[in-house]
Image (cartoon, rainbow, N blue to C red):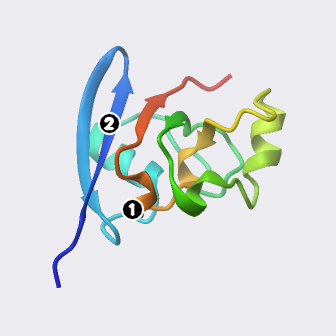
Amino acid sequence: MTRSTIKITVLENEAEQTIETYKGEYRNLMELLKDKLYFDCFGECGGMGRCATCIVHVTGLQGSSVKQDRNEPVTLARYGYKDESEIRLSCQLLISADLDGARVSVLEEN
C-alpha cells in the first residue's frame, strides 16, 4: 500500500517552506509544525484546544477539516477570533488529505 503525500506550505516570519507528510505520520497539524519547525511555546495545552498557542491562519482546507468542532470555536472566540473561518487551532486539524495544498501562516498568540 502506498501512502499519498500531503504537502502543506507554511509561512512563518516571512519565510515560506513546503512540508511533506502523510496520513498517520502525525496526529495533527500542531505536532507536525512543532516537529518540523521547532517552535518554542507552541501548543502548550498539548492539543486540548484551550490555550490558543498553536493558532494559525489556513487557506485551502478541504472536506470535513473546514468545520470547527470540540473546544475550538469557544477558544477562538475567547481570543477575539469569532466567525473567522480561516483562523484555526492547529491542534484541531487532523493530518489528512483535507490539508493537501493548504497554506498555513503561524500567528502570534494574542
**Residue 14 to residue 20: above or below:** above
For the C terminus, give its image quadrant: top right
Identity of the residue drawn at 24% across and 38% down: 18
Secondary structure under tag 1 reads helix
| Badge 1 amino acid | Ala
Q: Quadrant of residue 47?
A: bottom right
In this view, the mark in front (2 or 1): 1
Direction from residue 107 to residue 23 in the image, left or right: left
CB under 8 Å between discs 2 and 1: no
Task: Say which residue label 1 marks.
Answer: 97
Label 2: few (<14), some (14–19) or many (≥20) C-alpha neighbours in 10 Å: some
Task: Say which residue label 2 marks.
Answer: 9
**Residue 20 to residue 11: above or below:** below
In this view, which residue lies farthest toward the bottom? 1
Q: Quadrant of residue 8?
A: top left
Looking at marks 2 and 1 on the same chain, the residue that comes earlier in the sequence is marked by 2
Identity of the residue drawn at 53% across and 46% down: 90
For the N terminus, give its image quadrant: bottom left
